[in-house]
Image (spheres, rainbow, N blue to C red):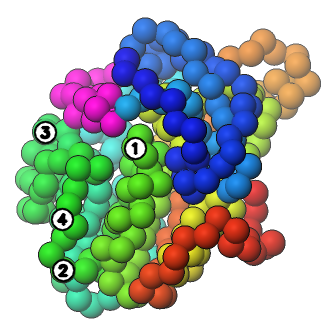
Amino acid sequence: MDLQLTAVCRWCGAGPLRAVYPFTITEPLADFSPSQFQIQQCDACGSWQVNPHPSHEASKKFFSSPERWLSGRDPDRLMVNPLDRAEKRKLEYQIYAQAMTAYLPESGAVMDIGAGTGLMLSLLAVPNPKIAVEPNILAAKLAGERGLKVINQWAEDLVAPKKPLAAIILNQTIDHLSRPDLFLFKALNWLAPGGLLLLGNLINPKCLAARIYGPNFRLFHPFHQVYPTPKAVNRVLTPFGFEIIEIWRPYFKTPYGSIPKFLASASAMALRFLRLTPSGPSPAFIGNTVTYLARKTLLYRTISVKNQIPSSLPC
């Protein structure tokens, strides 16, 4: 795999970075030879990240491969079909779509970058033009069959749209990029004043499961390149003139969450916390991922990593 070592934080662009711990990815949790990676934390914004990390070309190749939309194993080591897995997120995506509909400006297109099959865009009951950006040719074809305009391209290769956008959706996308900081720097300026940004399912390295399981947290993976905490998300968005207007921890709306699964996971985590069970991948649990809906209230403000963070935001 083509790896790069980046000295600065790939979320806020600052630093310094300090090592948290190494972790090893082994089959069947990854589709490449087992390798050792380092989790590092940024002292400026608090985000965590993989370093060394897959390069732009390595990430693009991995997610553009047709095999990514064939059956494979999920974090629970169960064989799943990506199309079926996407459709099972419909209940969750409806929540985001309804919230966006309430705030969405009347003019401007909605661009879903890393749209997969275009499910979330299809749930938006708005007259705005909808653009699905998807690098995987199989997923892009399915998005086109939903009647969406499709751009078969990798996020970091996109050029600025001709007109300001009403919304950008980045659901399970931004953390897969080699330089999410550089991508956000340009993409946030594509939004019109009042435009919306949905950052979907960002992995929270300070969640309870990550605290208990450490390097065995189920969502640590080389292609999950950055893990911004809620404070780190706010620290990057606020200097651009964004306000976070909705926050979700969507566990119970996903295929991984239910009352029986919650009770089983809570029991397993308690036993692991007490060191009564051997180490292994953590279970799905509340707070593993967080979704944010933000609104652009200013045209642009110069980025400053010294921006103050509201104390009301969780870690």
Residue to which mark 2 is pinned = 163
Q: Secondary structure at mark 1?
A: loop
Residue type, mark 2 in image? Lys
Please state, as top left, top right, bottom left or bottom right, where the C terminus lies in the image.
bottom right
Q: Earlier in the sequence, mark 2 or mark 3?
A: 3
> Quick check: 25 above or below 141?
above
Disc 1 packing (10 Å; few <14; some 14–19; many ≥20): many
- The number of numbered badges drawn on the structure is 4
Residue at horizontal 55 percent and vertical 54 percent from the top: 13
Are discs 2 and 3 less than 8 Å apart at CB?
no
Circle nearer the viewer, 3 or 1: 1
Are discs 3 and 1 less than 8 Å apart at CB?
no
Residue to which mark 1 is pinned = 177
Circle nearer the viewer, 2 or 4: 2
How far apart are the alpha carbons under marks 2 and 3?
A: 26 Å
Q: Secondary structure at mark 4?
A: strand
> Quick check: 226 above or below 118?
above
Are discs 3 and 4 less than 8 Å apart at CB?
no
Magenta part of the protein: which range? 56-73
Give whichever of 122, 116 is nearer the camera.
Answer: 116
> Quick check: 70 above or below 159?
above
Residue type, mark 1 in image? Leu
- Where residue 239 is drawn, which disc sits there? none
- Where residue 131 is drawn, which disc sits there? 4
Residue at horizontal 14 percent and vertical 48 percent from the top: 152
Q: Earlier in the sequence, mark 2 or mark 4?
A: 4
How far apart are the alpha carbons under marks 3 and 4?
A: 15 Å
What kind of secondary structure does the magenta stretch mostly adopt?
helix
Residue type, mark 3 in image? Ile
